[in-house]
Image (cartoon, grey):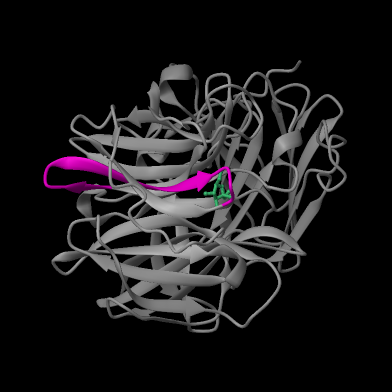
């Protein structure tokens, strides 16, 4: 089977992964826990895998952190430092369908012991999950979802063991579920705004949405829901706790739950997005919108121009009118185009698209006003396009690594590669 393993994106060694969990920066290390089946490449036996990195790019695999056990699976959650110890707060998903919040403690950030008081928060519900804990004032807040009620619950605690509900946020009743909430402040022109991220599944598929609003420790009041990424393959995003320099760094499961179980990789299945730093700006309608940038650590590692297209590359694409960029290997072509005011990302002729009926697709999305360029990260099995508030992420499975770039119209492109992999390569800029 073709080896689709990406170079810059995190994957499990030889098993399944889905959501990032327990994102915590501590003592110079970025901890990435993740939903993992330690026994195979399909969803099941959910546990927390673990890896650490000093630069958000090179990850060291650590032993399984929290294992499924008897009737209890370990679903998504978060991690914080409390009284000098790492506390992982996760959902216990029991065989009988019940979902409740539990704790596991670690002195060293590697080895976890489940709290004897588990579960610490049980509402007798079957859709109560995905706790994200954060400091607020001198206590803790936790946001969770009642998934089927499309409701976010806010609980408060001082010791992480005893929790009191203080608020809730619901949208119009609708069909579908909410998962993986995250709630955090970001600055916009010297003012604190709060961003609520939610992973949403409904009849149109699965995606991440966000709202920008205010939070008073109990109630979140938000503006309209916006798409976090308008491609198909970003879900269950989450941000790091205690990132240095006030940064808000996010990573997500680079997948569409509809076909995530069918993607043609082995022995691993599932990858994370690249880490992205978040900020706020005023959108075309004057309302606040999220801006995503590849994290500076990744950009710095790829700050070296090369000829040709290496298997993992950061591209700076510029244009001044209609433009096309075709990334190709033999018959496989991934096509990016600017057509009028739209950006087109077309994977329908790029390699294996037949493993699921919904995989072959073309995304056509409006570019933010005034856009004259975007950043593209192309890795073995994915393309991520970022242009200010616009983000488009697609998985791709070309038989061979895309190694050729052909430009048309006003397209310009600079190809950058990781210095360590492409030492002494000459500088080059392709296109007019
Ligand atoms: C999102 C999700 C979460 C849940 C986990 C189980 O992808 O369904 O709601 O905690 O995955 O693996």
Nearer to the camera, 355 or 91: 91
256 lies left or right of 183: right
Vertical placement of 268 versus 175: above or below?
A: above
For the image, the number of numbered tags is 0
Q: Quadrant of residue 268?
A: top right
Nearer to the camera, 375 or 183: 183
Vertical placement of 96 versus 206: above or below?
A: above
Give percent across and percent down for residue 6: 58, 27
Please say whether residue 352 is visible from this viewpoint: yes
- Quadrant location, the C terminus: top right
Vertical placement of 206 versus 82: above or below?
A: below
Give percent across and percent down for residue 421: 47, 18
Please say whether residue 61 is visible from this viewpoint: no
369 lies left or right of 116: right
- What's drawn in magenta, residue-wise? 80-97
232 lies left or right of 270: right
Q: Quadrant of residue 157?
A: bottom left
Give percent across and percent down for residue 337: 74, 53
Give percent across and percent down for residue 40: 62, 23
- Please tell me whether residue 151 belongs to the stretch shown in magenta: no
Nearer to the camera, 420 or 54: 54
Q: Is the magenta region chiefly helix, strand or loop? A: strand
Q: Quadrant of residue 164?
A: bottom left
- Quadrant location, the N terminus: top right
At horizontal 50% and vertical 76% (from top left) the residue drawn is: 283
At horizontal 32% and vertical 57% (from top left) the residue drawn is: 133
At horizontal 81% and vertical 44% (from top left) the residue drawn is: 359
- Please tell me whether residue 89 belongs to the stretch shown in magenta: yes
């Amino acid at each position: 089977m073709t080896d689709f393993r990406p170079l810059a994106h995190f994957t499990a060694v030889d098993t399944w992964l889905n959501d990032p969990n327990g994102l915590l920066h501590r003592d110079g290390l970025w901890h990435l826990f993740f939903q993992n089946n330690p026994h195979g490449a399909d969803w099941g036996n959910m546990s927390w895998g673990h890896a650490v990195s000093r630069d958000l790019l090179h990850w060291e695999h650590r032993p399984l952190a929290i294992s499924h056990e008897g009737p209890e699976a370990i679903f998504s959650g978060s991690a914080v430092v409390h009284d000098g110890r790492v506390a992982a707060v996760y959902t216990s998903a029991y065989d009988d369908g019940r979902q409740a919040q539990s704790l596991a403690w670690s002195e060293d950030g590697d080895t976890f012991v489940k709290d004897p008081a588990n579960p610490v928060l049980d509402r007798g519900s079957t859709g109560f999950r995905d706790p994200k804990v954060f400091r607020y004032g001198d206590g803790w807040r936790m946001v969770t979802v009642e998934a089927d009620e499309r409701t976010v619950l806010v609980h408060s605690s001082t010791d992480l063991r005893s929790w009191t509900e203080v608020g809730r946020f619901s949208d119009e009743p609708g069909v579908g579920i909410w998962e993986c909430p995250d709630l955090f402040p970001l600055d916009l022109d010297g003012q604190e705004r709060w961003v609520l991220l939610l992973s949403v599944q409904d009849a149109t598929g699965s995606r991440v949405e966000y709202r920008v609003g205010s939070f008073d420790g109990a109630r979140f009041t938000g503006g309209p829901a916006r798409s976090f990424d308008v491609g198909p393959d970003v879900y269950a995003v989450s941000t790091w706790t205690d990132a240095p320099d006030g940064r808000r760094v996010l990573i997500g499961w680079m997948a569409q739950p509809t076909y995530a179980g069918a993607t043609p990789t082995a022995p691993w299945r599932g990858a994370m997005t690249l880490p992205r730093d978040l900020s706020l700006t005023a959108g075309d309608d004057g309302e606040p919108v999220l801006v995503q940038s590849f994290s500076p650590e990744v950009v710095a590692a790829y700050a070296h121009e090369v000829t040709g297209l290496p298997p993992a590359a950061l591209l700076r694409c510029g244009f001044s009118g209609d433009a096309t960029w075709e990334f190709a290997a033999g018959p496989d072509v991934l096509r990016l185009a600017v057509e009028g005011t739209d950006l087109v990302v077309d994977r329908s002729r790029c390699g294996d698209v037949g493993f699921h009926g919904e995989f072959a697709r073309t995304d056509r999305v409006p570019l933010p006003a005034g856009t004259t360029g975007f950043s593209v990260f192309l890795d073995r099995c994915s393309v991520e396009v970022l242009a200010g508030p616009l983000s488009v992420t697609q998985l791709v499975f070309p038989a061979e690594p895309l190694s050729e770039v052909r430009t048309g119209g006003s397209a310009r492109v600079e190809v950058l590669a990781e210095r360590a992999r492409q030492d002494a390569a000459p500088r080059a800029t392709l296109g007019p």
